[in-house]
Image (cartoon, helix red, strand yellow):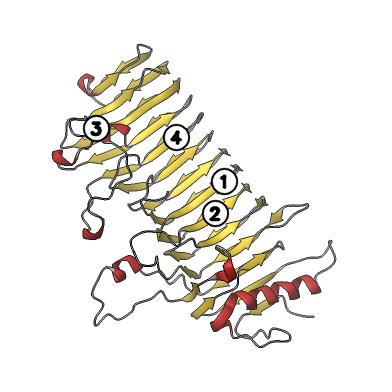
Amino acid sequence: METNVYDVTDWKVPGRPIDPRNDIGAVINSIIADIKRRQTDPADKPGAVIYIPPGTYSLKTRVVVDISFLTIRGSGHGFTSLSIRYNSDTTGWHELNPGGSHIRVENTDGHAEAFLVARDGSPRLSAIAFENFALDGVSFGANQNSYRNGKVGIRFGSDNDSVRVRGMGMVYLEQALVIQGPDALDVSGNFIAECGTCVMIVGGSQASRVADNHLGAGPVGFSIFAENSNGLLITGNNVFPRGIDSVHLKNCFRSNVSANRLQSFYPGSITLEGNCKENLISSNMFERVAESYGPFLGVSNGLGDDFGVVQINGDGNTITANHVTYVIAPDQVTPVGATPAVFRIRSGDQNVVGGNHTITNLTVHTVVLDAGTTNSHVYDSGTEAQLLAQSASYGFRPTP
């Protein structure tokens, strides 16, 4: 019986010797071709495991995954900060580059992605897993603080079911993880930082989870972005600055953003854009502070502090039991003369803001109700002086 477990360092590409250290992409594509050659019975396709031992590998050929039940697994996410490295004198440093099962994403034969997961036809791809290795975008070019290099770590380019991205390390990619149309997706336990955008769910999703990750995007993108998602669970994440948003949901409904720690140097830590309905934002720890790292002083996401730490658009959303620390120097408030907003309900009906606690050194509006809001309910989330109501359609109980 032929094995369904492959080691990239043992595999011999038919017809042409390729060292995985020189192009692991070509080696993995050859292994996938072998799996497809051997597993031809639609009633018996168990898939396979491709193992990447610790080491440094160059990826010059994009990997195309078009089979279900495939796990690509390493032994160590190997994350290390390249931003600190590129902005420091590294003389005498012990390490300069990521470690573990470390893949350097290089030119990928003219394609943006290191890994493309996609196929046509039915059924959709299922039970694919990426686990415990490093994807390193290497460099952002002449400006190492630009977060731009056109590189994508993993792109799911067609609808998929029950895929897993776990224990990965990703750094210096313009887009780390892009997933189209997932059903029962699990993104957990990853360290994805210093990327333009970390996790992006596009086209819609259902019953998916982004949990227990360390994430940190750049000012050109989002730490977590999702659109048209139903039942998305975002929980237990530790999100660092400097993304445009920590969590950005667009036209999402009945999703849950809870028990995350969200630190931001900019307004707009959580944004519900478009028509977001019946979402729960609860028990999060927000920390809005000022940028202190020299190379990024003066960089912003272009939003004013009156935008809100949390901005809501849509109906029937609940924002409760959150803790907000908002401590910046008064002269850093933008635009000049503005009163910062914490929870801003920009549009929608029957939104609830209750039982939230704000600690700040500033005069703030803890809750802002824009003119387009109706039937809002605000309680125990600030004093009467901290409420700015531009609508007459609301109920209010001040914090005792």
Q: Is residue 381 visible?
A: no
**Residue at the image point whose x is 24% and y is 83% from the top:** 92
Q: Residue at x 30, y 81 (%)?
A: 94
Q: Which residue is mark 4?
A: 272
Q: Are marks 3 and 1 in contact (CB under 8 Å)?
A: no
Q: Are marks 1 and 2 in contact (CB under 8 Å)?
A: yes
| SS of the residue under disc 3 | loop
Mark identifier at residue 202: 1
Most distant residue in the top direction: 392
Badge 3 amino acid: Pro
Q: Which residue lies under the disc numbered 3?
A: 340
Q: CA distance from mark 1 to mark 2?
A: 7 Å
- The tag on residue 178 is 2
Q: Dot 2 lies on which element?
A: strand
Q: Quadrant of residue 366?
A: top left
Q: Please state which amino acid type lies under the numbered disc 4.
A: Leu
**Disc 4 versus disc 3: distance between alpha carbons?**
18 Å
Tag 4 secondary structure:
strand
Q: CA distance from mark 3 to mark 1?
A: 31 Å
